[in-house]
Amino acid sequence: MKRTTLLVAVGVTVLALLALFVGVALATTPSGVTATPLTRATLGEIKAKNDGIQVKSVPGSADVALVQVTIEPGGSTGWHHHPGVVLVSVASGTVTEYDEHCEQSVFTAGEGFVESRDEVHIVHNEGNVDAVLYVTFIVPTTTPPTGLTIGDPQPEDCEVQ
């Protein structure tokens, strides 16, 4: 009986690792994108409320990280998602965000958007000037610097790359 349990556990582990590596291998790559980390700080547990805005983390520690992202004309972030909550401010240019259902939203300088709930998406610069975004990540403290963006494969029902 113990041998069967061990074989099942090993099989499940191998399948999970295979799915992880295949998912990473199929992830789409960014093009024409420069990400410049500006700062990162540990906030601890967040409980803040003011003027009708409330921010609260689950028990534990959260970090805030600020990154400047420049997307060249024709550039793309590749399909991806994020841990935590991401607030995006478009400083210049125009970007088009596509969700996993290929629905698009266009954002111009002075506008912003929120990314959360592990939503798979891609951001394109379909204009003719650089688009500059300031991206604020609120993530668990355990998130490594390279884990702010997690690459995903292109959704089957969307031809956007």
Image (spheres, grey):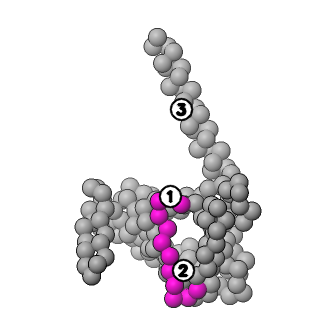
Tag 3 secondary structure: helix
Q: Is residue 101 left or right of residue 66?
A: right
- Work out whether mark 3 precedes mark 1 in sequence or the reverse, and give the earlier one: 3
Residue 34 belongs to magenta span: no
Any part of residue 71 in sight: no
According to the picture, the residue beneath numbered tag 1 turns out to be 118
Which residues, given as a range, are shown in magenta?
108-119
Q: Residue at x 56, y 37 (%)?
A: 16
According to the picture, the residue beneath numbered tag 3 turns out to be 13
- Work out whether mark 2 precedes mark 1 in sequence or the reverse, and give the earlier one: 1
Horizontal and vertical percent for residue 81? 54, 60
Residue 106: assigned label: none
Tag 1 secondary structure: loop
Say which amino acid is labelled 2. Leu
Q: Residue at x 73, y 77 (%)?
A: 74
Residue 133: assigned label: 2
Q: Is residue 21 left or right of residue 40?
A: right
Horizontal and vertical percent for residue 111? 51, 84
Mark 2 residue crowding within 10 angstroms, few (<14) / some (14–19) / many (20+): many
Q: Residue at x 67, y 62 (%)?
A: 29
Say which amino acid is labelled 1. Asp
Mark 3 residue crowding within 10 angstroms, few (<14) / some (14–19) / many (20+): few
